[in-house]
Image: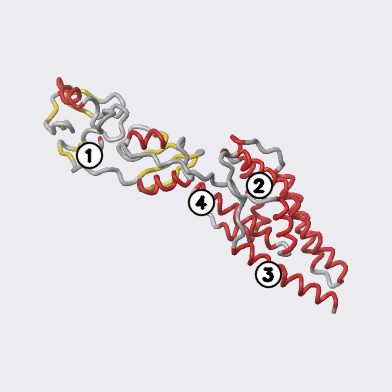
Amino acid sequence: MSLTCPYCRDTIAEAEKHCCPTCSTPHHLDCWNDNGGCTVFGCENAPSDEPGIVIKPDDIKGGSIIPDKPPVSYLVHRNGQQLGPYEMQQLLSYSAEGRISPSDLVWCQGMAEWLPLSQFLVGSHIPSPSPRRIATPLFLYIPLGRLVGMVLLSFGIYGTYWLYKNWRFLKERDLLNIRPFWRAVFGVLFIYSLLNTIKEYPETQRICPATFSAGGLSAALISLSVIGNALGRSNETAVSVLGIVITLTAFVFILPVQKYINAVNEIISPRPHFHPWSTGNIVCASFGVIIWLLLIAGLCG
């Protein structure tokens, strides 16, 4: 099968052939020298000032060249997981938001190897997004006092909200295919997975390694929740109230995790702001107050 030079688009004789040492794309030796390197978009041997003719090795088939088209789909390799495909605008947007880090690897059809995002953007002659001026908090960043107060005021509902916000952070940050709402509602089933992910999260580990035990805290929280719910269904008022108290106190086992989250965010420069009061906070508190009033009315009656 005859080969076609992507630079001059003439047939390449065997004696004139020069293959790129990185992507193996064949060229005329004179064309290689005239272009100053490889003509493949994204190849590390392409000229630094101009990418040459935008063409992929797969486009050279049977001596013909498919019309030039820039890559439209990109894959991202992060922490052993392949994500995508994404369009270039998505890459730029996710990078600006911190969902994709400069060290994450990017690849598209026609590239000989995976490249770090930072190097890929420069090599593609696409400006890297400007750094964010305000640091984005890692996980739900709130004061411990507010967490305790909201859990008690909301009759424990805020504990579910806490789970939801942290799962949502992971979904958006790592582009996970999960449903944070249901993972929060069935929190007992997913609590260990969440706490262990927070503990082992690469970005937080680089800032400040965690020391809490995800397994120990999860086991204690699950045990108290199960015991509290069982006692809370008793027909005896005293036993039922004891069950409610036990269930509400189970949240103390997420305090070491929140303390760690806060410690990590306090090291980030510039330091991010605490999570603001939101509609979710108001809804949790409102439902909690209603439940407290109904409970007190029932006890008094």
Answer left or right for 112 relative to 256: left
The secondary element bearing badge 3 is classed as helix
Which residue was labeled with disc 1?
59
Q: Nearer the viewer, mark 2 or mark 1?
A: 2
Of discs 3 and 1, which sits in the foreground? Answer: 3
Image spot of residue 197 (x, y percent)? 61, 44
Q: Left of 246 or right of it: where is 90?
A: left
Quadrant where the image shows the N terminus: top left
Left or right of residue 172, residue 85 in this image: left
Name the mark on residue 287: 3
The residue labelled by disc 4 is 172
Q: Earlier in the sequence, mark 2 or mark 1?
A: 1
Amino acid tagged 4: Glu
Give the distance between the C-alpha atoms of the residues marked 4 and 1, in whole angstroms: 36 Å
Q: Is residue 145 left or right of residue 36?
A: right
From the image, state whether disc 4 or disc 2 is nearer to you. 4
Which quarter of the image is occupied by the C terminus?
bottom right
- Residue 158, x across and y down, in percent: 68, 60
User: Furthest residue to the left?
Assistant: 10
Q: Earlier in the sequence, mark 4 or mark 1?
A: 1
- Quarter-of-image position of residue 298: bottom right
Which one is nearer the viewer's eye here, 121 or 76?
121
Q: Earlier in the sequence, mark 4 or mark 2?
A: 4
Q: Mark 1 and mark 4 in contact (Cβ < 8 Å)?
A: no
Q: Whole-percent x and y of residue 21?
A: 29, 24
Q: Earlier in the sequence, mark 3 or mark 2?
A: 2
Image marks 2 and 1: residues in contact by CB distance under 8 Å: no
Against 65, is 186 above or below?
below
